[in-house]
Amino acid sequence: MLLKTFGWSFAVTALGLVAAVLYGGWAALGLVAILSVLEISLSFDNAVVNAGILKKMSAFWQKIFLTIGILIAVFGMRLVFPVVIVALSAQLGPIEAVDLALTDKDQYQQLVTDAHPAIAAFGGMFLLMIFLDFIFEDRDIKWLGWLERPLAKLGKVDMLSVCIALIVLLISAMTFATHAHQHGGTHVDKAETVLLSGIGGLITYMIVGGLSGYFEDKLEEEEEREHEQEEEAVRSGKPRSAVVVAGKAAFFMFLYLEVLDASFSFDGVIGAFAITNDIVLMALGLGIGAMYVRSLTVYLVREGTLDDYVYLEHGAHYAIGALAMILLVTIRYEINEFITGSVGVILIAWSFWSSVRRNRALAAAEGKAAGSDDKTEVSSGV
């Protein structure tokens, strides 16, 4: 099972490390290995959240997620995305941007640094909306009950998450963006850029998430009717309306996953520049890490880990909230990649341990209940 799920990741790791040695020797291999670990540590929370969505999808769409999805994730976000942001920020053509990335790596890194406020605002707002919508929803299972119960009550207020997100964006633009740090110690006003990019992230979340939710609801409605209409559907042929709706639902959920992965990728791509500004090594290292995140997502789904450890999803969403705030703070201040990665790992580890303790407590309670039932039967038999 483990080899079946992680087989492609192991293969890509071997190929990537060999390519690194051929490209730049043993030093390049070390850099690629470090980048891979960085990507996995920064994106573990991504895998947990992805698993919560992917488990609702069919085996076919899970395969699409691992094939076409990984191509988008690796080549789109880890290779094309850094070039695109440089091209847009420097008003260069895509070919010129690629040439710059390969021939003048210092200038390329500088252009990416200049584009960071826009990237951080877009990704930060998208992730912040995911976190807010999660904590404002009233759930049967609560991890930090003292916090989640009052927040669930506040969540009954319409559009509260959007209002809070816009307030956070406005504060970020007024405080961090007006003194955004640039190369050479100078400071420039990036408030307008941050506002526009942040609103873009918010709109992207609302469109993709809204479409995904709409078609998911339609799918559930069709599934409820399916049993009643089964005999008639068999006589008239395949239930094509249900198939079409399921396809749309799966497509938009897949689209949502890709945008989510892209937002999670921002910190990895930006963090990678602290290690190397070589676009080839960056693509190899982050690509290997992205493969493991994908495989880990499928593993969590197939093993039912989220059902067994019920607080994992909570921990991942708290990690998303932390990452969103970190991205917004990095508009002005530099934050060590170790801090960025460790915050998510700590929150998920905490939620995992809480889940283990909960399972033990439930097992102990069931054991006591079974014991008392046995005693009752014995006494009644006597």
Image (cartoon, grey):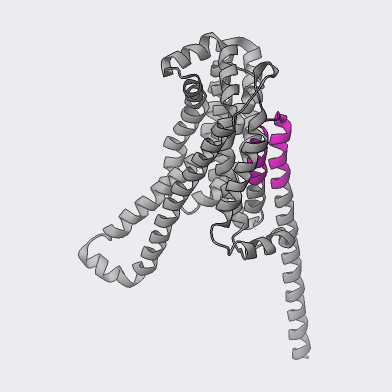
Give x and y (percent) for residue 365: 75, 70
Q: Is 203 or 15 nearer to us in this picture? A: 203
Q: Is 184 or 255 nearer to us in this picture? A: 184
Q: Quadrant of residue 213?
A: bottom left
Q: Which residues are magenta?
A: 319-348
Left or right of 203: which side holds 49?
Answer: right
Residue furthest out toward the top: 103
Q: Is 167 or 279 nearer to us in this picture? A: 167
Give x and y (percent) for residue 266: 57, 33
Q: Is residue 156 magenta?
A: no
Instruction: Decide if residue 325 is in sight here.
Output: yes
Left or right of 87: which side holds 248?
Answer: left
Q: Quadrant of residue 72?
A: top left
At 72% across and 66% down in the image, what residue appears? 362
Position of the C terminus, as image quadrant, is: bottom right
Q: Is 181 or 340 nearer to us in this picture? A: 181
